[in-house]
Image (cartoon, rainbow, N blue to C red):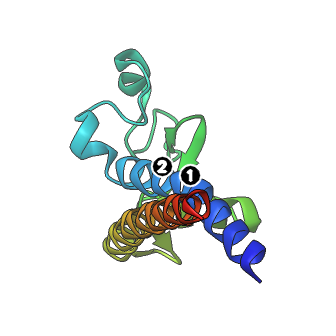
Amino acid sequence: MKKMRTLHLWIGLICSIFILLQSITGILLLNERLFMGDRVGGEPPDFVQMQQQQSPDASGAERTNFRGGFPVGPDGGEVGGGALGFIKNLHKGIIGGTNISVLLNITAIGMIALTLTGIMLSIKTLRAQSKSRRKQRQAESAT
């Protein structure tokens, strides 16, 4: 049982670093306009200038916005169905045309808080184990 707890502690500590990284980068990507200004998705400014507004072209047909090479609907979500379109929209904070980015931001902040406190508790546990081992060694060497 003790080995399982130790294994759980170390796996949790290592994985929590990746969870923390994903949560922080998720907030940055979800709110990229706050951090990048007019630069969409980190593309060079000339690519941003190539993005088109939803308006009829000379032939009267509707043009489509493009972001990162993918068509974008009026709500900012990916155009087109299927699992890939749903996943991309979910990561942009859009489900069925409903903007859930505030909920995703709150969730990411919660994950950051849980991960940081988990890391702190793991470090505290490792320090306590280290002190216990030192005391045990000292007691064994004294006898």
Q: Amino acid at mark 1?
A: Phe
Of residues 104 and 50, the one drawn nearer to the viewer in this rendering: 104
Residue placed at 31% from the left, 52% from the top? 31
| Location of residue 80 in the rendering, given as x and y in whole percent from the top left corner | 67, 60
Which residue, given by chain and number where applicable, does mark 1 sit on? 18
| Location of residue 9 in the rendering, given as x and y in whole percent from the top left corner | 61, 68
Q: Secondary structure at mark 2?
A: helix
Residue placed at 39% from the left, 66% from the top? 108
Residue 78 in view in this figure? no
Q: Left of 38 or right of it: where is 27? A: right
Q: Quadrant of the C terminus?
A: bottom right
**Separation of residues labelled 2 and 1 (CA atoms):** 5 Å
Please say if 131 is above or below 63: below
- Badge 1: how crowded within 10 Å, few (<14), some, or many (20+)? few
Residue placed at 61% from the left, 63% from the top? 140
Residue placed at 36% from the left, 47% from the top? 28
Labels 2 and 1 touching (C-beta < 8 A): yes
Q: Amino acid at mark 2?
A: Leu
Which of the numbered marks, if any, corresponds to residue 21? 2
